[in-house]
Amino acid sequence: MNSESKVIDEPRTVALRLRELGVEPKVLRDAILDGEAARESCTAHDPVQMPGFLAWGRVVRGLRDRLVPDNWKARDHRGYATVVSPDESIAIAVATGNEVTGTAGAGASTKYPKGAATVTAVECNQLELFAPDQPSVEKPTTVTWLLLIRREGDGIHAELSRPELLDTKGFVARWSERILLELIDVEPEPTVEPHHDVDEIEIEVTRRTTA
């Protein structure tokens, strides 16, 4: 599914690259742990979608809580939740990753197909990537990165990666860059497991008609 991309996995190089993007590694780690704490607060009486929804929402909130004081901005365009850098050059969204997430192997992708908001974001990434030196092409001001997260047993695998292409089913098929985060050790996985997670909520806006 996934063509070769630039992979950064050496811890010191990872930290340096993240700081170039304006993000401390601890910010990502702590936001991810916020999400896992929210997931583990659920019980068997919660709706099956609730653990994944809460985890996703708390990671987004955790990123915003830590980055907005540094002049980042919370943005929810058509329900696509991101946090945007002060100069608006970078946006970070949160998604569940597949079984390769957080490892250097080929095939890393989102666990679930993405919707129209991610499609638009990836198309903007493509414009920025393939037309960097063409002044006649109007380039996007914001490049979107995905914080991919995968829970497996007593460890959380994650990466901050820049999607370049989606396949026809809506999965990320190619990345221009993948920054692999250090494995996060946690308690064994809880028994309550959601049937699926939530990565983005898209709101369709319809114009009211008058008689």
Image (cartoon, rainbow, N blue to C red):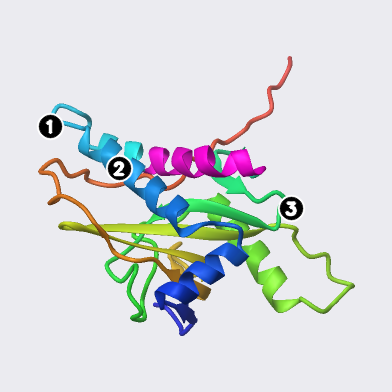
Indicate whether residue 67 is drawn in magenta: yes
Q: Quadrant of the N terminus?
A: bottom left
Chain-order first, disc 2 or disc 1: 1
Judge from the rendering whether residue 114 lies leftward or rightward of residue 83; answer left or right.
left
Give the distance between the C-alpha atoms of the residues marked 1 and 3, in whole angstroms. Answer: 43 Å
Q: Which residue occupies the extreme bottom position in the image?
A: 4
Using the image, tell me which numbered label, if any, was put on residue 52. 2
For badge 2, the amino acid type reads Gly
Residue 19 falls in which quadrant of the image?
Answer: bottom right
Residue 62 visible in the displayed image: yes
Q: Residues within 10 Å of mark 1 (few under 14, many from 20)?
A: few
Which residue is label 1 attached to? 44
**Helix or strand or loop: what does disc 3 sit on?**
loop
Judge from the rendering whether residue 191 lies leftward or rightward of residue 129; answer left or right.
left
Chain-order first, disc 1 or disc 3: 1
Question: Magenta region's main secondary structure?
Answer: helix
For badge 1, the amino acid type reads Ala
Task: Name the residue: 62% across, 33% down.
Answer: 205
Q: Which one is in front in this view, the residue at disc 1 or the one at disc 3?
A: 3
Which residue is label 3 attached to? 87
**Helix or strand or loop: what does disc 2 sit on?**
helix
Indicate whether residue 23 is drawn in magenta: no
Residue 75 falls in which quadrant of the image?
Answer: top right
Using the image, tell me which numbered label, if any, was put on residue 187. none
For badge 3, the amino acid type reads Asp
